[in-house]
Image (cartoon, rainbow, N blue to C red):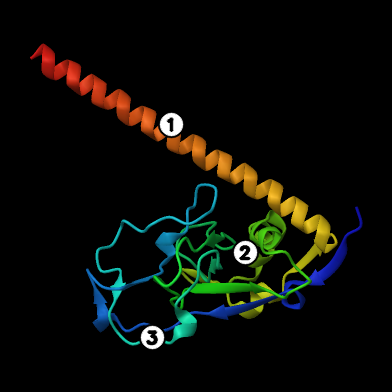
Amino acid sequence: MKLSKHKLGELIEVTRGASLSGQFYAEKGEFVRLTLGNFNMNGGGFKENTSKTDLYYTGTVKDEFILNKDDIITPLTEQSLGLLGTTARIPESGKYIQSQDVALVKCKKGLLDPNFCYYLISSSVVRQQLSAGAQQTKIRHTSPDKIKDCTVWIPELEVQKRIGRILSDIDEKIALNRQINDNLSWLDRSSKAARVHCAA
């Protein structure tokens, strides 16, 4: 398989989210603001943030910051060690607002397959470059330009598509197995609770 060398900036557009004023944070509303808590540290992917209650945003926001289903996002701030390079896909259109700590990644058509891109950015090759180039403060930061400056090696588009499909299928099976295990655990706990109640 032939690989070609590129800077990510040749293959993707990376944009920073909106600066959202805290005075418009709310416990209810139409739009949810994305935070670093929406990135799953255990294996990547999107998760609902349950650590905060004021996740809604009631202020005015430009349409470009309201994301669509399957948009790819990655953090610009490393709140937890190893967070840089994590990727997630937006699960629903018209609900989530891209905040300034979150980058939106768009593939350049005909150059990079979105599924392949999702896994490329979270690969060890890119993560190592982001970690090495992160701004050294108490909480480390990266930027759209630093992401675009990462060097990658990629196959031709049709091969990317096949690899992306395979990896997506594997992730879907893993997610389904986790869901089944969670349901079985819940049934087991419920059964034990019922037996204890009957015994009492």
Which callout, 3 or 2, points to the residue nearer the camera?
Answer: 3
Q: Residues within 10 Å of mark 3 (few under 14, many from 20)?
A: some
Label 3 or label 2, whichever comes before in sequence order: 3
Residue 196 is tagged as none
Q: Residues within 10 Å of mark 2 (few under 14, many from 20)?
A: some
Q: Is residue 185 above or below residue 103?
A: above
Residue lying at 47% horizontally and 53% vertically, measured from the top left? 40
Q: Quadrant of residue 154?
A: bottom right
Name the secondary structure under disc 2. Answer: helix
The residue tagged 1 is 181
- Asked whether, in this view, residue 144 is left or right of residue 81, the answer is right
Name the secondary structure under disc 1. Answer: helix
The residue tagged 3 is 61
CA separation in Å, label 3 and label 2:
31 Å
Q: Position of residue 189 (x, y in %)?
A: 27, 26
Q: Position of residue 145 (x, y in %)?
A: 65, 80
Q: Position of residue 193 (x, y in %)?
A: 19, 23
Q: Quadrant of residue 58?
A: bottom left
The residue tagged 2 is 131
Q: Can you say which quadrant of the picture contains the C terminus?
A: top left
Q: Nearer the viewer, residue 122 or 56?
A: 56
Q: Identify residue type, mark 3.
A: Val
Label 1 or label 2, whichever comes before in sequence order: 2
Label 1 or label 3, whichever comes before in sequence order: 3
Residue lying at 72% horizontally and 64% vertically, measured from the top left? 113
CA separation in Å, label 1 and label 2:
34 Å
Q: Is residue 19 above or below residue 103?
A: below
CA separation in Å, label 1 and label 3:
40 Å
Q: Position of residue 150 (x, y in %)?
A: 72, 70
